[in-house]
Image (cartoon, helix red, strand yellow):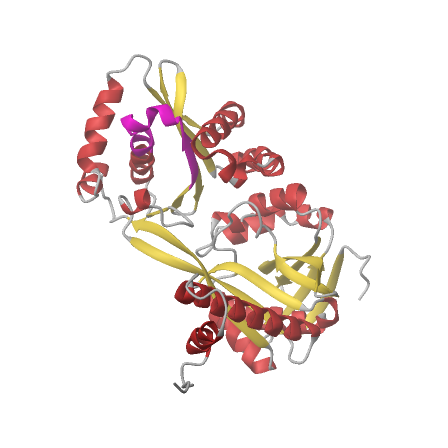
């Protein structure tokens, strides 16, 4: 396979009944990614795709944060030439234990909290497309050692389909849990007052909002147009840093550059909104929200700690719920993290998983097994430290306590 070509094409027989044949392309350069914009947008609007799988989010990530990685987009077209599937990957070389590894990973899986990363598969053709993509990965197996797919929703069809494909091909697959994401589903036609009544903070929200309304210069603004967002985004960064300081990855210059680049792309597609709550002409709280399909997502927030006692964050989150309901969204997603304030509003949880795949007896398989063993060993020694503590700094009794954890079936003589 010619690695200099920006797009390569192979015919692959359909995995579904009928004469249809699929065409698989490997897109390796930015201009090829750019050329997919309109088709990608159309495909991502079908089915239940996350905003983090949109062309806007992933193209912005590729330009701003994907510098170490090479594009490796697997696209599948049907016999009419219509884009039916995309596996949005990137190729990175790493060193581990003195060996060089070729690592295939999702675009967008690092630095910006992308949840529910996934393959884009046309509804109704998921099984056929997953099999075609697995065949394509097998044909280019000399180009990768480990395929790592992080933060896939546990119930995504991709998870089950990939597991079945791996079993059929004899590949090794490791599946581990990643993040828990609180969310709330709205009833059809539900009003905000009805929703608020079943939350844990209804009384507090109403009381705090009434107090804020009486303050001079109280205002709620919603930035959606590019010129509005250009003013609101720095305010969001300021308030987020006031709240979280250096603990937040959003303070990193390269991450802020990503958002400065991706927000105009998202704005053009109507997928982003930044809320500001102001008092006396100064913003004291902000929420960065993402909108895609029928899901309203709370991406991040910040507020001035001097206003914490006035619950400005609580009030502004409530206002985002008010808008989500008024605009007909069916779901509000808090994304990763189970912070206590989220449980005041959302009652349900979904989980993301990480899949790691390697061919048996390959370098990638050896590394995966070695890393799993290393992780197990670390877990054992953490348990040993917890159990033993500093009670026995040395001597045979420490040895006996260690073995009591590692091999509880052994018995020591008196």
Q: Is 246 left or right of 302, judged from the image as shown?
A: right
Q: Residue at x 65, y 76 (%)?
A: 359
Residue 39 rendering spot, x and y as whole percentages: 59, 51
Q: Residue at x 44, y 33 (%)?
A: 273
Residue 240 rendering spot, x and y as whole percentages: 46, 32
Residue 313 highlighted magenta (yes or no)? yes
Q: Residue at x 47, y 36 (%)?
A: 272
Q: Is 84 left or right of 47, judged from the image as shown?
A: right
Residue 154 rendering spot, x and y as whole percentages: 43, 64
- Examine the rendered structure and indicate whether residue 20 appears above or below residue 36: below
Looking at the picture, tell me which residue is in the foreground, 351 or 33.
351
- Examine the rendered structure and indicate whether residue 120 appears above or below residue 318: below
Quadrant in which the N terminus appears: bottom right
Residue 301 highlighted magenta (yes or no)? yes
- Examine the rendered structure and indicate whether residue 386 appears above or below residue 347: below
Mark yes or no: residue 298 visible: yes
Span colored in magenta: 299-316
Quadrant in which the C terminus appears: bottom left
Quadrant in which residue 165 is drawn: bottom right
Quadrant in which residue 387 is drawn: bottom left
Residue 54 rendering spot, x and y as whole percentages: 54, 48
Q: Is 296 left or right of 9, judged from the image as shown?
A: left
Provide the major secondary structure of the magenta segment: helix
Q: Residue at x 28, y 27 (%)?
A: 309
Looking at the picture, tell me which residue is in the foreground, 249 or 69.
249
């Amino acid at each position: 396979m010619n690695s200099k070509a920006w797009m390569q094409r192979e015919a692959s027989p359909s995995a579904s009944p009928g004469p249809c044949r699929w065409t698989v392309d490997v897109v390796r350069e930015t201009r090829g990614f750019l050329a997919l914009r309109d088709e990608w947008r159309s495909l991502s609007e079908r089915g239940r795709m996350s905003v983090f799988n949109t062309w806007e989010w992933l193209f912005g990530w590729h330009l701003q944060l994907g510098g170490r990685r090479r594009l490796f987009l697997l696209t599948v077209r049907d016999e009419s030439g219509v884009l039916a599937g995309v596996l949005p990957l990137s190729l990175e070389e790493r060193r581990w234990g003195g060996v060089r590894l070729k690592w295939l990973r999702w675009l967008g899986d690092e630095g910006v909290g992308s949840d529910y990363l996934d393959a884009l598969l046309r509804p109704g053709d998921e099984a056929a497309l997953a099999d075609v993509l697995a065949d394509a990965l097998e044909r280019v197996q000399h180009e990768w050692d480990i395929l790592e797919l992080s933060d896939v929703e546990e119930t995504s069809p991709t998870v089950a389909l990939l597991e079945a494909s791996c079993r059929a091909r004899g590949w090794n697959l490791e599946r581990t849990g990643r993040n828990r994401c609180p969310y709330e589903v709205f009833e059809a036609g539900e009003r905000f007052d009805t929703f608020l009544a079943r939350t844990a903070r209804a009384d507090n929200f109403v009381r705090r909002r009434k107090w804020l309304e009486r303050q001079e210069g109280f205002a709620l603004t919603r930035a959606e147009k590019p010129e509005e967002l250009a003013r609101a985004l720095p305010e969001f960064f300021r308030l987020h840093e006031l709240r979280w300081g250096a603990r937040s990855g959003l303070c990193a210059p390269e991450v802020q550059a990503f958002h400065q680049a991706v927000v105009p792309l998202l704005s053009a597609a109507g997928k982003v909104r930044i809320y500001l709550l102001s008092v006396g002409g100064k913003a004291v709280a902000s929420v960065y929200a993402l909108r895609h399909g029928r899901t309203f997502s709370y991406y991040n927030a910040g507020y001035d700690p001097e206003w914490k006692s006035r619950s400005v964050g609580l009030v502004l989150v409530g206002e985002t719920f008010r808008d989500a309901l008024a605009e007909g969204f069916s779901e509000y997603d808090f994304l990763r993290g189970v912070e206590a304030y989220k449980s005041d509003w959302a009652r349900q949880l979904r989980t993301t998983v990480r899949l790691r795949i390697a061919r048996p007896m390959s370098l990638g398989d050896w590394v995966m097994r070695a890393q799993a063993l290393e992780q197990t060993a670390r877990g054992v020694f953490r348990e040993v430290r917890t159990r033993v503590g500093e009670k026995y700094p040395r001597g045979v009794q420490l040895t006996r306590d260690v073995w009591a954890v590692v091999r509880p079936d052994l018995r020591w003589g008196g």
